[in-house]
Amino acid sequence: MNCTKVILSVFFFCCNLTIARAQYITVDDTKTAQQLVENILVNSSCATVSNFTVNGDTFTSGKNSYGYFNAGTSTFPFAEGVVLNTWSADKTIGPFVAGNNGGGSQSWTGDADLNQALGINSVNATSLEFDFTPLTNFISFNYIFASNEYQGNFPCNYSDGFAFLIKVKGSTANYQNLALVPGTTTPVSSVNVRPTIPASGAQGGCPALNQIYFNGFNTAANPTNFGGQTVVMNAQSTVIAGTTYHIKLVMADDQTRFFDSAVFLQAGSFAPKINLGQDRLLVTNNPVCFGQPFVIDTQLPTTYGYKWFKNNSEIIGETNPFYQAIDAGDYKVEITLSPSTCMAIGQIKIEYTPEIILSNSTLIQCDDNGDGKSVFDLTRIDNLIKNNDTSLSPVVYYETLPEAKLLINPILNPTTYTNKIINQILYARVTNSYGCVNYAELNLKISNNIIAPQNPISICDGDSVQDGLSQFDLNLLVTPQVLMGLPTGLLVEYYLNSSDAVLQKNPLANNFSNTAPNQQIIYARIVNGSNCYGLVPITLVVNPFSPPNFQTETAIVCENATIPLSVPLGYSSYLWNTGSMNNTIIVKDPGSYTVTVTNANGCKATKTFTVTASGIATITGTKVNDFAGNNNSVLIEFTGIGNYEFSLDNSYFQDSPQFDNVAPGYYVAYAKDKKGCGLSNPFVVYVLDYPRFFTPNQDGFNDFWEIKNLNLFPNATLTIFDRYGKLLKQLYANSSSWDGTLEGIQLPSNDYWFQLNFKDGKIIKGHFSLKR
């Protein structure tokens, strides 16, 4: 049983080893240069190859750095081909082993032609050279560049070199390198084709470069022993049929032998081909212009045999090396080459642009001086010429069709072009987004329509400042008059002067305020679409109307009275806000009254009367502050709707009803209306006070102590006391004085006290001095 296990283990190991090896390419490094070129790389009777040489590793015994490879059952993109390596060819066989420094020798030299083409210092060069005579006009081959420099941050700094070098045999010129990044002059290498390399530790990174051509980093399962590789690349060039070229395919390390690289050349891909040029497609922005024939030219000898096809159907009778296509299609040519009698096929797809549809147009301009010439803005007709196709280029105008076709002498001032002759024809040139061109005619004509002279347009100066300036609604006031009797569909534009009207510069707004007081001339341009129908001057008149003394006036109407409101005679009409149409009205109520007058020009002015009411006041009483010496005062109380002034003597009047520092005495109060409506009824006022001392010495001065006008208060009682409160004298309204005696005896000089009781709740107390 143990023996059986050993046998089965060996069996499965061998099977797995066979399967694993089947996943990698195989390499045969015993092929000669002629075999590599003639039987593998070219393998076509459509070209002559000769003079084969191969150079490479001469330092590794029994090994070559070039050979034939076969993909077998692996996933390598090429089924077979030629490999050129910077170490032994069989070292390219997978799996990929990371970190392998590679092989080669510092004694294995580089290649001078490669150094010159790439600007490197190469070592360990492998080159395959041969002469090549194509029977067609185009060559290409497919290749893959692979390298162990696709590890770490090596793609940021190091790159081995590969070149497809070609030149006419015997030429002393430098080789041309065809192994380039598509659309550039950049050689294909691990530095020039790489993904983003991130920084790692002390090693710096670098950004991606031409990443779309990088196929990816390899793993241990890769069919080859390289860290990474490009996608399938293509090298190509036009050639001259029958001319012999020298081809040199060379691969080398740069500077050091470490971390090797290789190029894999697809078998049979290096073959002459027919280049009919790029497909002319809408999607690639290079279609053939509508209506133009397109010559498909093989550029090959007439001695070859030709068959032409359109959409896979043979075009009978077409046997020339060229064919003129006049419509879209998939075109193919089959060529029998001689003397080899091999066959080559060329194909091209042709699409046409849509037709550029333009419209011949006419532009009619007005002539402001009758000389048959005017200034045209050609750009106003652009959209009509292009039929409003915004995808087309701006229109460029020329005076002749040959100039338009040759792109010489374009009209540089299309917005201000002056015609040279009457009814001049210009030529418009327009291109589409593909660069295709078409032309249209533009006929310049001078308008000969006659516009009747216009009546002046008059308005009144309607603002508060009568300066002869006002605003005109041109569409409302002017346009109907201008268009009267003219064909329908015309429009009117307005300008300050005839030059602007011709050039259509600085059009006036519809609500135009004149800039010259009282009278100004502007110009109406009558337009018919893009054309000028006619020009006519328009006189605008502003009539000021500022009657004298029409400022707002105020007036007073007294209660139960009326007043007249009046403006002068002589105007065409009057209208009050009361409805009256006379120059005078009688009013009795306060309020705002307006009258609008109209003069002979129909201009209006309005005057406002502000009427306020007033009336005679009624004094309802007074508030008297007396027995206060210098602080006696009187406050007049009143009612009324007016504005009043007040007096206690009908002589001196003041605004305030409050009177201060009033001396004791008899007064008559009045209130007078300031608006002139009259004087109130009089109102009697008494101000009382007492003497602060008296001197009863019978000299005729101050012999008695008494309160003046106390007799006006019959209910009042006046009582006098000494300092001890002893009653000395009681007085009444009819006996209101005291002579300073008590029962006929003179009292001594001293201070005495009194109490005055008015019996209405008002009591006055005080004291005075008796002096002997």
Image: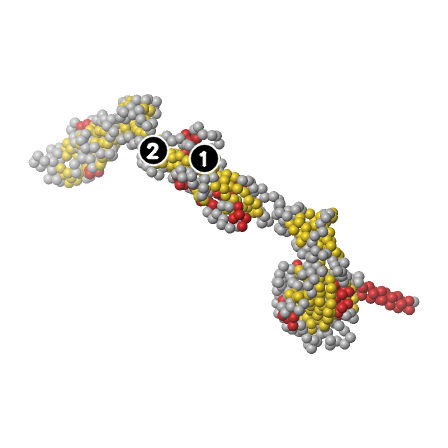
Secondary structure of residue under mark 2: strand
Seen in the image, is 334 located left or right of residue 422?
right
Instruction: Using residue 701 as the reference point, say whether residue 173 is left or right of it.
Output: right
Amino acid under disc 1: Tyr
- Tally of marks: 2
- Label 1: few (<14), some or many (≥20) within 10 Å? many
Residue 82 versus residue 382 in the image, above or below: below
Q: Nearer the viewer, mark 2 or mark 1?
A: 1
Report x, y in % for residue 553. 28, 30
Q: Nearer the viewer, residue 248 or 748?
A: 248
Q: Toward the viewer: 691 or 241?
A: 241
Residue at position x 33%, y 22% from top? 580
Is residue 507 visible in this depiction of the protein? no
Q: List x then y, in percent, for residue 458.
A: 35, 31
Q: Earlier in the sequence, mark 2 or mark 1?
A: 1
SS class, disc 1: strand
Q: Is residue 230 left or right of residue 757?
A: right
Looking at the image, the residue that sits furthest to the right is: 1
Q: CA distance from mark 2 to mark 1?
A: 28 Å
The circle drawn on residue 542 is: 2
Q: Which mark, residue 533?
A: 1
